[in-house]
Amino acid sequence: MKPFLEVKNLFVSFPTEDGVVRASDDISFTVARGETLAVVGESGSGKSVTSLAVMGLHNRKSTNISGQAILNLPTGPVDTISAAPEVVRKLRGKAMAMIFQDPMSALHPYYTIGDQITEAWQLYNDGSKADGIKRAVELLDLVGIPSASKRVKEFPHQFSGGMRQRVMIAMALVNNPSLLIADEPTTALDVTIQSQILQLLRDMQKEFNMAVILITHDLGVVAEVADRVCVMYAGKIVEQSNIDEVYYRPDHPYTIGLLNSIPRVDSIEGRRLLAIPGQPPSLISLPPGCSFRPRCTFSSLVPNKRCAIDVPDLDEKNSAHFSRCFLTEPQLVQLRTPTGVQS
Amino acid sequence: MLKFLAKRLSATVVVIALISVSVFMIFSFLPMDPAALTCGKACNPVVIAANRHRLGLDVSVPVQYGRFVKGLFVDRTWGEGAAKFSCPAPGFGYSFNRHECVTQLIQDAFPVTFSLAIGSFILWMLLGISLGIVAARKQGKWQDKFATAFVVAGVSLPVFVTALLTFIFGIKLRLINPIDMGRWVSPFSDPVGWLKTYYLPWIVLALFSSAAYTRFTRSNVIETSSEDYIRTARAKGLSERVILRKHTLRAALAPLLTIAGIDFAVLLGGAIFTETIFNLPGLGRLSIRAVQIDYDLPVILATTMLAATFVVVMNLVVDVLYAVLDPRVRVG
């Protein structure tokens, strides 16, 4: 059986006055139902742009999109990139749903929570408003909002950030979507609330047997919930593998850098966190060769300055473990041991 | 909500009282003597003194104000014996130039101003908002450019130029009869005559005022369209039509209410230019005549206070409506 979502060679770019912004550059991945794919990368690496393209939420006039994002629906496959806007619209909310980063601004301030959830439900269900409210209460209950039947009549500003994100999740789930895209769902929340929301997402995934794409820049979040990981850098996938491989055998210097930059409970006391030097490149004028080369501490290990000339392919280094780097496996094994600065 | 209303209502009464005091003060200290103005040809100090007594100006200003306020609630009488006359409550005083109670003058003029205001208000809101929405949806296209041109013209052409052009145009094409316009036509007894009298002034005022609303609507719709909650609405699978009608416009147009309320209140106080050019006997013309020709202090006092009261009351109405529209505005 085919995975529910297959993204193939997806390119998204925005023409601007300064040049073309290549936000997603040849992105391919799949997500099956019941599986969580984490898309990791820093701001501007093309994570959100990719997911918005899958959802068909880009302005088609000001965006150039090519490639495929195929949803394998029971009724047959649909490519959300090439399908008519009306067709894609009718997939949104039902086949695929999305929750966003900032729950403070993602809900309409003038309508009650119940109204907003009911509105989504009524799009795909024949039923009165009272039925919709009933369904809304059920879902609010499910996502852990206390006294849901009372709170359903309240407005977004009467909820805390974490509660609003729960509302967003309830709203996304109201039509039993097969794919849920969560775009940095915990970034705007307190740390204590973050893990609650992640736990909730995991529970809901089991409950609804969804394919989940979790977009985040937080590797801690990834470790908690993901089955597989895509690491993105400057619009490209630089590493893709299952979760254990990425954490224990990272195959790309960028991933190694990211892992070295997060604090660990078992790290040697007094060791400072290692930052990746430099800034991500502008997506308008990428450096020649590997986009990560200017920040890569290991590029000198590759002979003939190849990193500055050729763009490495996304190669399968180990089984089902892809990486976009010229370094060989024996070289990488050595690099994985962090050489932190002793204080 | 009731507590909020009571609080705001009492504040409104205080504001109106303060306005009446200051307006009364300003006109009491003007270097004009109404007693001398109504004196006539055979003027001498004795007549002036008699006049002053007759007009009730021979007492201190606070006492005058007290009598004025009293006149608002009970009938007020001037003069003695055969020359005695009175105005029934609620009275704003007596116009010695026109020999009429001010309340009567206002009662005659207000329907004219109200007809002018309500028609042009509806017209300009419809025109301004719909043009603004079209401009926002067709950003950069010819519709948007047309709206921009309209805004520039509407904002930069003074209302008397537009009104004068329309007036001349209207007479040339025999669209209006300036003599007819000087009479009050009731929309209940003669709806066609009413429409005929007012449609050109409506258009003039609407053209002039809707430009600002077009600009405001356009920028608000564009701004709201990029809000996160609009993206959420889209992600739900709502159609563009529903998103615009239910989500974007609700949020984009609510702030317009405040300006619209005040604009309407100001209009109710009298549209001086439009009424003057179109020969409409409304509040605006009543006050401009009182100021320019008659130095008719009771009339000026009454129209000024009325205009201020409209603004203050409309402010209250707008605040209450806004609290209904936007749940984030807490009342209490």
Image (tube, grey):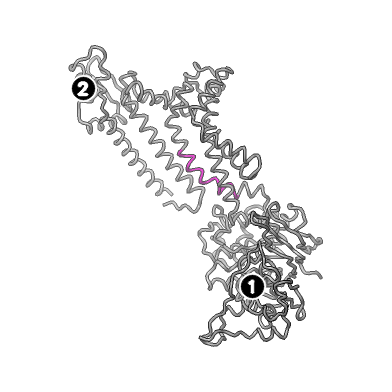
Residue A99, image x, y percentages: 63, 63
Q: Quadrant of residue B303?
A: top left
Q: Quadrant of residue B195?
A: top right
**Would you name the residue on which mark 1 appears?**
A294
Local crowd size for mark 2, using a 10 Å CA cut-off: few (<14), some (14–19), many (≥20): some
**Residue at the spot 52% in from the left edge and 62% down from the top edge:** A159
Q: Characterize the magenta stretch by its predominant secondary structure.
A: helix
A210 vs B245: above or below: below
Label 2 secondary element: helix
In the picture provided, is B99 more to the left or to the right than A332? left
* Amino acid beneath label 2: His
- Marks 1 and 2 sit apart, C-alpha to C-alpha, by 96 Å
Q: Quadrant of residue B48?
A: top left
Local crowd size for mark 1, using a 10 Å CA cut-off: few (<14), some (14–19), many (≥20): some
Q: Which mark is residue A304?
A: none
Q: Mark 2 lies on which chain?
A: B
Residue B100, image x, y percentages: 34, 20
Residue A3 counted in the magenta span: no
Residue B26, image x, y percentages: 29, 33
B287 vs B313: above or below: above
* Amino acid beneath label 1: Pro
Residue B252 counted in the magenta span: yes
Residue A156, image x, y percentages: 54, 58
Q: Is residue A206 something one can see in this rendering?
A: no
B204 vs B125: above or below: above
The foreground one among B143 and A164 is B143
Which segment did they paint magenta?
B247-262
Q: Residue furthest front?
A: A304
Q: Which mark is residue B53?
A: 2
Q: Which residue lies furthest to the top in this view?
A: B42
